[in-house]
Image (spheres, grey):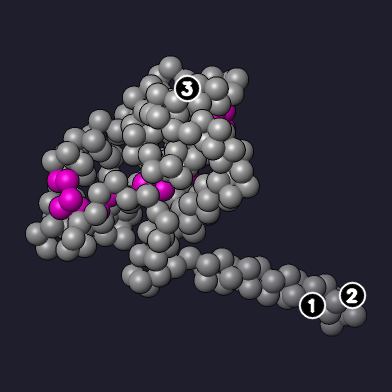
């Protein structure tokens, strides 16, 4: 075997080991145990729209307020929340899509509202008015400020929070958890730690929730 061939084979072997190491590290970044998945899905600061006393069923939604599919799922989600109330825990996580012009603006506004105890009404306001502000190339920050005023928020504090590094980090942390859990688009639902793979309609989500409640 020539010296050049030995060197070439050595380089290939090193490169192969590097690729294997990267794959192993990436696999280790993804939680696999139920406890690890649960702790990544729902953090202590995650926004709960309802909380079940028995903790039997937890539904987590990763969403983008400017996502058309999220808007399409929203009526079904609201119907289910009204139907089940505190029989289920319903958690909302941010997963803004970079290609949506105001996805991050909306998430930051919702988080700023959350810091004044108004996450749920702001969440509803964003979806209820999404056809008006969504998919506009120009910033909709001023529109979100009018929503804050309508909901009785301290506007100065709201504007400060929207622009803060803390709020930006909070939104990015949710998105990072989503990526760790394999979220690739929105809306993505998890029911009791299992990713919901069907199209999220009222009927399909209800069937999955009922199954979890009775199991």
At numbered mark 2, what does the secondary structure look like: helix, strand or loop?
Answer: helix
Tell me residue 12's x, y (percent).
75, 71
Q: Is residue 69 visible?
A: no
At numbered mark 1, what does the secondary structure look like: helix, strand or loop?
Answer: helix
Q: Are marks 2 and 1 in contact (CB under 8 Å)?
A: no
Q: Is residue 47 visible?
A: yes
Tell me residue 75's x, y (percent).
25, 30
Toward the viewer: 171 or 175? 171
Specify which label sits upstream in the sequence, 2 or 3: 2
Nearer the viewer's eye, disc 2 or disc 1? 1
Q: Which residue is most to the bottom?
A: 1
Q: Which residue carries the number 1 mark?
A: 10
Q: CA distance from mark 3 to mark 1?
A: 64 Å
Nearer the viewer's eye, disc 3 or disc 1? 3
In the displayed structure, would residue 145 be above or below residue 88? above
Q: Which residue carries the number 3 mark?
A: 146
Tell me residue 198's x, y (percent).
27, 44
**In this rendering, position of residue 105 left or right of residue 212:** right
At numbered mark 3, what does the secondary structure look like: helix, strand or loop?
Answer: helix
Q: Which residue carries the number 2 mark?
A: 4
What's the residue at 29%, 46% (across, down)?
A: 49
Q: Which residues are magenta?
A: 84-106
């Amino acid at each position: 075997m020539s010296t050049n061939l030995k060197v070439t084979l050595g380089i290939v072997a090193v490169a192969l080991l590097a690729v294997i190491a990267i794959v192993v590290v990436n696999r280790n970044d993804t939680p696999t145990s139920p406890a690890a998945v649960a702790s990544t899905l729902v953090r202590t600061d995650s926004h709960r729209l309802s909380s079940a006393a028995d903790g039997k069923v937890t539904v987590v939604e990763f969403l983008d307020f400017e996502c058309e599919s999220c808007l399409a799922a929203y009526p079904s989600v609201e119907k289910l929340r009204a139907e089940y109330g505190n029989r289920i825990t319903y958690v909302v996580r941010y997963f803004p899509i970079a290609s949506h012009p105001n996805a991050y603006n909306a998430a930051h506004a919702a988080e700023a509202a959350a810091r004044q105890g108004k996450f749920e009404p702001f969440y509803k306001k964003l979806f209820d008015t999404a056809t008006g502000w969504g998919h506009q190339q120009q910033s909709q920050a001023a529109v979100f400020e009018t929503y804050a005023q309508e909901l009785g928020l301290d506007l100065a504090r709201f504007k400060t929070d929207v622009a803060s590094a803390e709020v930006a980090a909070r939104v990015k942390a949710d998105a990072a958890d989503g990526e760790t859990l394999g979220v690739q688009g929105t809306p993505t639902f998890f029911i009791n730690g299992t990713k919901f793979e069907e199209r999220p309609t009222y009927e399909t989500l209800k069937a999955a929730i009922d199954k979890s409640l009775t199991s």
